[in-house]
Image (cartoon, rainbow, N blue to C red):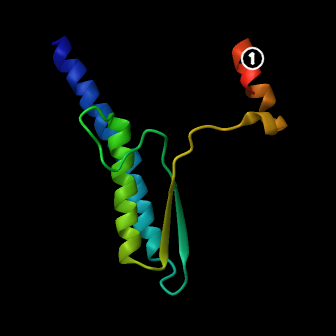
Amino acid sequence: MNCYVALMLTLGFFRQYLEITHDYTIAAARAFSTIHPDSPFTFLHVSGEGATQSPGTFTTLYGRVKGQVESELLDLGKTNPMFRVYNVRPGGVDWTKHPAIHPFIPPQETYKKMLI
């Protein structure tokens, strides 16, 4: 019983993750690609560090799904020259130059302070 419940929770999570990460993004891109057929439209997709368009044996679910979305978006951009797709993979934010977010950054350990 426990294994079955765990499997169902995992499958439920996977389906929900796939729907939100893949399906919603692709549906939005397809909708936006038809808005202005005569003028360029830029679609900026914020993917993530770890995404890959050529997954291997040990690639995580996150990396596979994000990479698949990136590939499909690029293919959509190739079929519609007025729909410009950019996939970005932010790896981190340099918070030291943004005083507005300093109150939200946890205290840094000494070795990290020396690196900054």
Circle 1: element type: loop
Asked where in the image residue 11 lies, by quadrant, the reply is top left
Identified at 35% across, 67% down, the residue is 75
Q: Count every numbered label the image shows and give the total.
A: 1
Q: What percent of the width, then of the height, locates residue 103? A: 80, 26
Front residue (pair 95, 34): 95
User: Of the residues shown, which amino acid type is indicated by label 1?
Assistant: Pro
- Whether residue 41 sits left or right of residue 29 in the image: it is right
**Horizontal arrangement in the rendering, residue 24 relative to residue 88 (left or right):** left
Name the residue at 50% across, 71% down: 84
Q: Residue at x 22, y 26 (%)?
A: 8
Image position, residue 83 (x, y; %):
47, 74
State left or right for residue 18 relative to residue 86.
left
Residue receiving disc 1: 107
Quarter the C terminus occupies: top right
Q: Does 12 appear above or below 34?
A: above
- Residue most toward the front? 115
Q: What residue is at 30 percent from the left and 35 percent from the top?
A: 14
Query: Is 46 above or below relative to 112?
Result: below
Work out whether residue 116 or residue 44 is closer to the camera in this orientation and state it.
116
- Taking depth in this image into account, of 37 and 77 the one nearest to the observer is 77
**Residue 107 percent coordinates (x, y):** 74, 17
Image spot of residue 10 (x, y percent): 27, 27
Residue at the bottom extreme, as displayed: 38
